[in-house]
Amino acid sequence: MNSESRRENDNEKIGIQRLLTPKDVADILGISVKTVHKLVRDQKLACVQVTTKERRFTEEQVRAYIEGQSREIHQVRVDTPRPRPVSSESKKGGQKALGFSRRSLIEEMRQWH
């Protein structure tokens, strides 16, 4: 039996599994390594702190994060604005929002001469 198979056999006996690197987790989640580290800092993703600079992750930690972020949608609700009733009639006869028509302006300009 070679040393690698012995090591794997020993790991199975004591329940140790392979730890995932931040790159592995980033690939699984489809995000960047930088975002993985941000999730750890924000305490949204648990990790195994190997050294002060090295982090590793168990499959359970990644699964717990995924399950914590998953949401079931029971009912889809779409908010649509309700039409408001018109409070006043529209202005007719060329009147503008200022309250006078183009015709009245032209008549006033003719009086200037």
Image: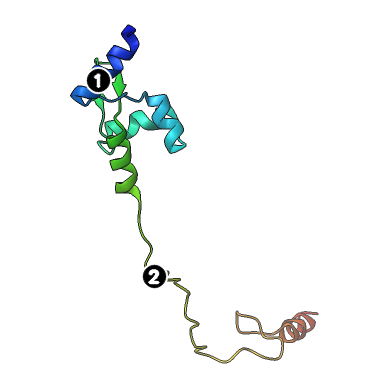
Residue under the image location 47 percent in, 37 percent down = 30
Residue 19 locus on image (x, y percent): 31, 24
* Relative to 12, 38 lies left or right: right
Residue 29 locus on image (x, y percent): 42, 37
- Indicate the amino acid at tag 1: Asn
Q: Quadrant of the C terminus?
A: bottom right
- Indicate the amino acid at tag 2: Gln
* Relative to 7, 100 lies left or right: right
Residue 48 locus on image (x, y percent): 24, 25
Q: Which residue is mark 1?
A: 11
Residue under the image location 23 percent in, 17 percent down = 10
Q: What kind of element bears circle 1?
A: helix
Q: Quadrant of residue 16?
A: top left
Residue 87 versus residue 38 in the image, above or below:
below
Q: Quadrant of residue 17?
A: top left
Asked whether 93 or 101 is in front, the reply is: 93
Q: CA distance from mark 1 to mark 2?
A: 46 Å
Residue under the image location 61 percent in, 84 percent down = 99
- For the image, the number of numbered tags is 2
Residue under the image location 28 percent in, 42 percent down = 64
Per the rendering, the mark at residue 82 is none
Residue 9 versus residue 98 in the image, above or below:
above
Colour theme:
rainbow
Q: Quadrant of the N terminus?
A: top left
Q: What kind of element bears circle 2?
A: loop
Asked whether 82 or 76 is in front, the reply is: 76
Comes first in the chain, label 1 or label 2 = 1
Residue 10 versus residue 37 in the image, above or below:
above
**Labels 1 & 2 near each other (Cβ < 8 A):** no
Q: Residue furthest front?
A: 1
Q: Which residue is mark 2?
A: 75
Judged by depth in the image, the label closer to the viewer, 1 or 2, is 1
